[in-house]
Image (cartoon, rainbow, N blue to C red):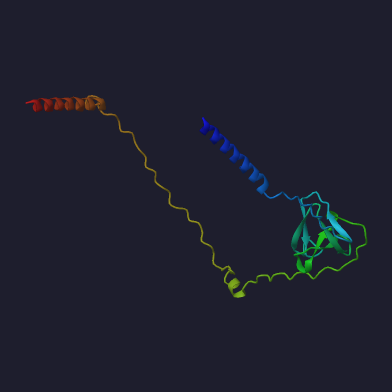
Amino acid sequence: MKRIWFHLTAFTILIILFSYWIYFASPPTVVLAQQPTNIPSGIFITVITEEPQINVRMGPSSSIYPIVGTLLRGETAPALGRSQGGDWIKIEYPGAPYDQGWVYSPLVQVSPGALQIVGPPPTPVQPPTATIDPTLAAQFNVIPTGTRPPTFTPPPSLNTPSFTQIPSGNPITSVPLAAIILALVILGMIGFSLSLVSHRR
């Protein structure tokens, strides 16, 4: 009985020590304050479109300049200027050429202030267009000849064979097929019987 009490007491002490070690040995949880977001100083734009993102282009045109990045709805960026008509806003965009890009002004809201008019960047160099080798193209120029095209000659008509019905023979001389089959069955049974009798001997 004393052994049981000793084992229970030792086990209880071990559990208490283990719980104490887990509680005090674990590092304290440190809660860090949220870092403030980078709010641009001066005039800035905020994306206000209903779409999840807008394109940032290399210049103030969607047909001439390529896309260099995107801005998400609610994102802000410092505004550097505007196009001549005010349709495009030049922004600071890290990662783009010269760390600048252009956004379409109806998709963003500009903070209060006056933006100066800035000129567009040079248009990007278009890749060279493929030219066709004239000697290769000349091989595919087909010049019609003055000969007449062949005329259609109809094939000769096919002779269709015609079948004539053979008159049925005399009913006395013709043997029905069922009679032949019956005779063969009877002959087979006679042969089978004879083979059984010969094996028994």
Quadrant where the C terminus is found in the figure: top left
The quadrant holding residue 148 is bottom right
Residue appearing at x 76%, y 68% in the figure: 97
Please state if 152 lies on the left or on the right of 31 as rendered. left
Residue furthest bottom in the image = 135
Q: Along the line of sight, which residue is nearer the eye, 6 or 125?
A: 6
Confirm whether residue 82 shows in the render: no
Q: Position of residue 166 (x, y in %)?
A: 30, 33
Q: Position of residue 47 (x, y in %)?
A: 82, 54
Q: Along the line of sight, which residue is nearer the eye, 87 or 171?
A: 87
Residue appearing at x 62%, y 74% in the figure: 134
Is residue 116 depicted above or below 1 in this figure? below
Is residue 10 depicted above or below 100 in this figure? above
Please state if 9 lies on the left or on the right of 96 as rendered. left
Residue appearing at x 17%, y 25% in the figure: 189
Confirm whether residue 4 shows in the render: yes
Q: Along the line of sight, which residue is nearer the eye, 106 or 159?
A: 106
Q: Along the line of sight, which residue is nearer the eye, 76 or 183?
A: 76
What is the count of numbered marks? 0
The quadrant holding residue 22 is top right
The quadrant holding residue 18 is top right
Residue furthest left in the image = 201
Q: Position of residue 196 (x, y in %)?
A: 12, 26
Q: Position of residue 39 (x, y in %)?
A: 84, 57
